[in-house]
Amino acid sequence: MAFVTLIVIIITSTVQSIFGTGVLLFGTPLLLLLGYNFQDALIILLPTSILISFFQVINNINKIDYKFYKKLFIITVPLICLFLFLTNINPFNINLFVGLLLVIISLKGKIESIQSFIKYIIKYEPLYLMITGIIHGITNLGGALLSAIVFSKNLSKGSKRTTIAVSYLTFAFFQILTIILTFNNNDAFNKLNLIYWISGVSIFLFVEKYLYFRIDEKKYIIYSNVFLFTIGIVLILNI
């Protein structure tokens, strides 16, 4: 199990190192399929996501869209903490919810009604950020919605990745803080998770130096949508 989990960390860290999101978006459904419960999946994934996001942000602070980030911090973060807390004190079948959401997200570029709805609510940014916070708190998949709204902005490639990274860093920090303070769960700091952290950072340093500027964004979107759809269906069938 630990070896397979490490493979998941390596693959998802590669994706996040390129696009600013990936460890949580792809790692959460994969760990659920491996048999982890939601809280244990978070404990494994959140520190790795925090470290990668930190390194993406630290040398590119001037590229952050601070106007957007301020809104996100005020609106989204409190809802993430609240719904993460509620989800953990009242557990439900998270696999079904995650599976359905993944299928919807994967089809947004193919089904006009889904794409139109997302574009419509993006216009109402505070409402969109509220929905993102609720979904991320419940499923850990708000990164898809975060990416959608940031990619819709007229920003450079570097600014988009940095804004997504600092937002994701903030999400993950407050999620891990919520788990530690409200559920007294310190398992994130065990020795095995330390291996995952080191692996995630190592992958980031390699990708940043050798791969980041060579990736075709259009192909990534196609492949990721196929992957999300497949994992979503598997999760739904496994409820």
Image (cartoon, rainbow, N blue to C red):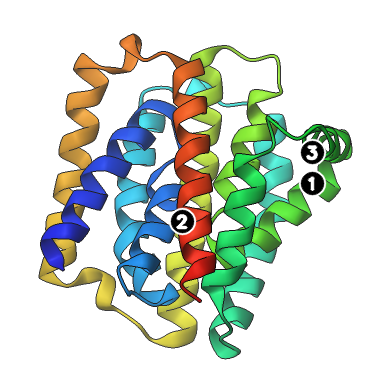
Position of 47 compared to 217: left or right?
A: left
In this picture, is 178 found above or below 116? below
For residue 184, which quarter of the picture? bottom left
* Residue furthest out toward the bottom: 89
Label 3, label 2: how many angstroms apart (C-alpha)? 24 Å
Q: Earlier in the sequence, mark 3 or mark 2?
A: 3
Where disc 2 sits, the SS reads helix
Q: Position of residue 9 (x, y in %)?
A: 25, 50
Q: What residue is disc 1 on?
A: 128
Q: What residue type is labelled 3?
A: Ile
Q: What residue is disc 2 on?
A: 172
Numbered circles on residues, count: 3
Where disc 1 sits, the SS reads helix
Q: Earlier in the sequence, mark 1 or mark 2?
A: 1
The residue located at (55%, 74%) in the rendering is 94
The residue located at (17%, 26%) in the rendering is 206
Q: What residue is disc 3 on?
A: 118
